[in-house]
Image: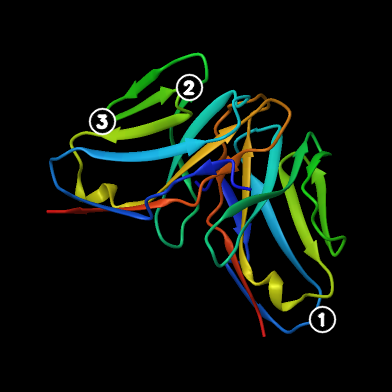
Amino acid sequence: DTAVSQTPKYLVTQMGNDKSIKCEQNLGHDTMYWYKQDSKKFLKIMFSYNNKELIINETVPNRFSPKSPDKAHLNLHINSLELGDSAVYFCASSQAGVGQPQHFGDGTRLSIL
Amino acid sequence: DQQVKQNSPSLSVQEGRISILNCDYTNSMFDYFLWYKKYPAEGPTFLISISSIKDKNEDGRFTVFLNKSAKHLSLHIVPSQPGDSAVYFCAAVQAGTALIFGKGTTLSVSS
């Protein structure tokens, strides 16, 4: 039973398109996250939501808009895709509280042509 | 500026020996440090963590040591097994802020 699942696993699209990545967790966690792993393999936080409310937004372009319909879901919508958006995007969840371990999905590899 | 640094991109160890993965940090306000393991095409998996008020935490074959004066932590894996071959990420967090990851160290354990 997958704890944090994200779809799709692979996404190949052209510059200028709009795309969405979905994430769902069945762990009952209060907090969900989106990370970007770029070509240099750095994992960087993009957004964090706690009980459907945005708590962290790490200077991500406005073209990226997270949406949390409920605390088990955190979707990522990206407008006007650019070449630099090519990366692996990871969703994660955790209990609230500093130091709580985060559980990650298997990532979505986004390739912009 | 990187607040969490893993200066060794790779480490090779023989099966049964000890693996020591190192991590340095610059922010003395970090409250917790965590280690994650990552296999190709999978997400990172939590391994072990340590609070900034402790200097050692052990879980089975995995032990994390924290040296606050040196702003350094290390993950020891004893004994190493081929299944431990993966990328290991060190991460740190301060209350109210996001988890910050190092760049990772690729561990290869040969049988």
- The 10 Å Cα crowd at callout 3, few under 14, some 14 to 19, many 20 or more, is few
- The 10 Å Cα crowd at callout 2, few under 14, some 14 to 19, many 20 or more, is some
Marks 2, 3: nearer the viewer: 2
User: The disc labelled 1 sits on which kind of residue?
Assistant: Gly
Q: Quadrant of residue B101?
A: top right
Q: Residue at left 83%, top 47%?
A: A69
User: The disc labelled 2 sits on which kind of residue?
Assistant: Lys
Q: Earlier in the sequence, mark 2 or mark 3?
A: 3
Contact between labelled residues 3 and 2, with CB atoms less than 8 Å apart = no
User: The disc labelled 3 sits on which kind of residue?
Assistant: Arg
Rounded to the nearest whole Å, what is the CA distance between mark 2 and mark 1?
47 Å
Quadrant of the image containing the C terminus of chain A: bottom right
Rounded to the nearest whole Å, what is the CA distance between mark 1 and mark 3?
48 Å
Q: Position of residue A25 (x, y in %)?
A: 63, 44
Dot 2 lies on which element?
A: loop
Which residue matches tag 1? A16
Dot 3 lies on which element?
A: loop
- What label does residue B61 carry, if any? 3
Q: Position of residue A45 (x, y in %)?
A: 67, 48
Query: Residue A57 versus residue A19: which sits nearer the camera?
Result: A57
Which residue matches tag 2? B68
- What label does residue B93 carry, if any? none
In the rendered picture of this protein, how many numbered marks are placed on residues? 3
Contact between labelled residues 3 and 1, with CB atoms less than 8 Å apart = no
Q: Position of residue A105 (x, y in %)?
A: 56, 51
Q: Quadrant of residue B56?
A: top left
Rounded to the nearest whole Å, what is the CA distance between mark 2 and mark 3?
23 Å
Dot 1 lies on which element?
A: loop
Q: Residue at left 48%, top 22%?
A: B68
